[in-house]
Amino acid sequence: MEVRYASYCSYRIRYHVVFVVKYRKDLLTDEVSKYLKEILLGIGKRYYLQFHAMGTDEDHLHILVEAAPRYSPSQVMMICKSITAKETFKRFPKLREELWGGHFWTEGGHIDTVGDGYGEEQMKEYIRKQGGDPNQLKLISF
């Protein structure tokens, strides 16, 4: 894992984040997944996050992301969840009809750290194998 530099510090902080679609609805189609990647690339530029991989399985999303120490893990999750939900609803307004209450993601989520002992390639392989059928999950690299 590459060391990153910011003013007055260097760091290597990488997270595996999982978001679940509200009510476990199967809404992450190929079209929605491609758009989520576009959104995440925009988030990366704005918030200085580095996205390494994204995997979708119709009702949940896995992300491998690197963040600066200015952001706590919960902030990384909040930034990604709120912006992806808002932008997805703008692009696909019909999804609101499936999700009463106006929320795209469930309230919770999962986040864990990825270190040198369990690196990026192992995490990408883990993300690829998630879901009922390992060939069903779509792994998208950045």
Image (spheres, helix red, strand yellow):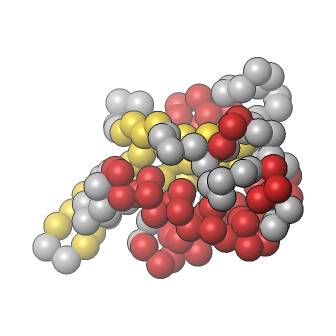
> Residue placed farthest to the top in the image?
132
Residue in the image at 34% along x and 50% along y: 73
> Residue placed farthest to the left in the image?
8
Q: Is residue 127 visible?
A: yes
Residue 141: percent from left, percent from top = 66, 53
Where is 70 relative to 111, above or below? below
Residue in the image at 47% along x and 78% along y: 46
Residue 70 position by quadrant: bottom left
Residue 123: percent from left, percent from top = 53, 35
Residue in the image at 17% along x and 67% along y: 9
Where is 6 relative to 82, above or below? below
**Lateral position of residue 55 relative to residue 120, left or right:** right
Between residues 35 and 81, which one lies in front from this camera angle?
81
**Lateral position of residue 97 relative to residue 106, left or right:** right
Q: Is residue 121 visible?
A: no
Q: Quadrant of the C terminus?
A: bottom right
Residue 121: percent from left, percent from top = 54, 37
Where is 77 relative to 122, above or below? below
**Lateral position of residue 43 relative to residue 125, left or right:** left
Between residues 128 and 101, which one lies in front from this camera angle?
101
